[in-house]
Each structure stands twice: as C-alpha cells, then as structure tokens.
C-alpha cells in the first residue's frame, strides 16, 4: 500500500534534490523514496573517520603498535553518536 506523505524542505535543498532526480532520470518522489529505503537498509551507521585519524594526535602514541586498540576506541566513539 502506498501512502502519500508531505515533507517540508528549504527551497535550496528542494531545488538541488529535484536537479539530482532529473540527472538520474527519475521523479523527485522516486528519488526521496530511494533515499529513505537506502538509509533504512543500512545495518550500522557509518563511523566518522576523523575518530580514527584523531587518535594519533596526542603526540605520544605508536600507531603501528597500538593500532588494534586505537581502531577499537574509534569504533566505540562512532557508536556513541
């Protein structure tokens, strides 16, 4: 069953989304449906890669030696957001 849904977008975002849909050769509604479906299909949210790169900024770490611990910390930080 299809249900009509109304959303509110600022004019700039709406125009950009309509342009993107046109480039893809699909309607604006189909573009929004695909975005929602893709977002809901993702099992886990993408972690911020900055969390991984920022771990070595303390100046005293050895990334090669401590990489497993650092990656674990970065992954845990990404899950908290």
Image: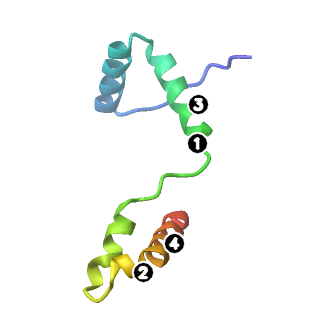
What element does badge 4 sit on? helix
Q: Earlier in the sequence, mark 4 or mark 1?
A: 1
Q: Earlier in the sequence, mark 2 or mark 3?
A: 3
Classify mark 3: residues with Cα within 10 Å, few (<14), some (14-19) or many (20+): few
Q: As rendered, which of 59 and 20 lies closer to the eye? A: 59
Task: Report how far apart the C-alphas of labels 1 and 3 lie in the structure.
Answer: 9 Å
Please give left or right for residue 8 compared with residue 43 in the image.
left
Q: Residue at x 35, y 34 (%)?
A: 10
Query: Which residue is labeled 4 in the image?
Result: 72
Query: Which residue is labeled 1 in the image?
Result: 42
Q: Position of residue 47 (x, y in %)?
A: 46, 58
Q: Residue at x 48, y 74 (%)?
A: 68
Query: Which residue is labeled 3 in the image?
Result: 37
Name which quarter of the figure residue 36 lies in.
top right
Asked whether the beta carbons under mark 2 and mark 1 sit within 8 Å of each other, the answer is no
**4 vs 2, front mark:** 2
Task: Report how far apart the C-alphas of labels 2 and 3 lie in the structure.
Answer: 38 Å
Q: Residue at x 53, y 25 (%)?
A: 34
Query: Which residue is labeled 2 in the image?
Result: 66
């Amino acid at each position: 069953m299809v249900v009509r849904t109304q959303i509110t977008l600022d004019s700039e975002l709406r125009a950009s989304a309509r342009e993107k849909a046109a480039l893809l050769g699909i309607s604006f509604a189909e573009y929004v449906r695909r975005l929602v479906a893709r977002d809901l299909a993702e099992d886990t949210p993408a972690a911020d890669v900055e969390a991984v790169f920022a771990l070595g900024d303390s100046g005293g770490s050895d990334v090669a030696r401590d990489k497993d611990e650092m990656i674990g910390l970065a992954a845990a930080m990404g899950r908290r957001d």
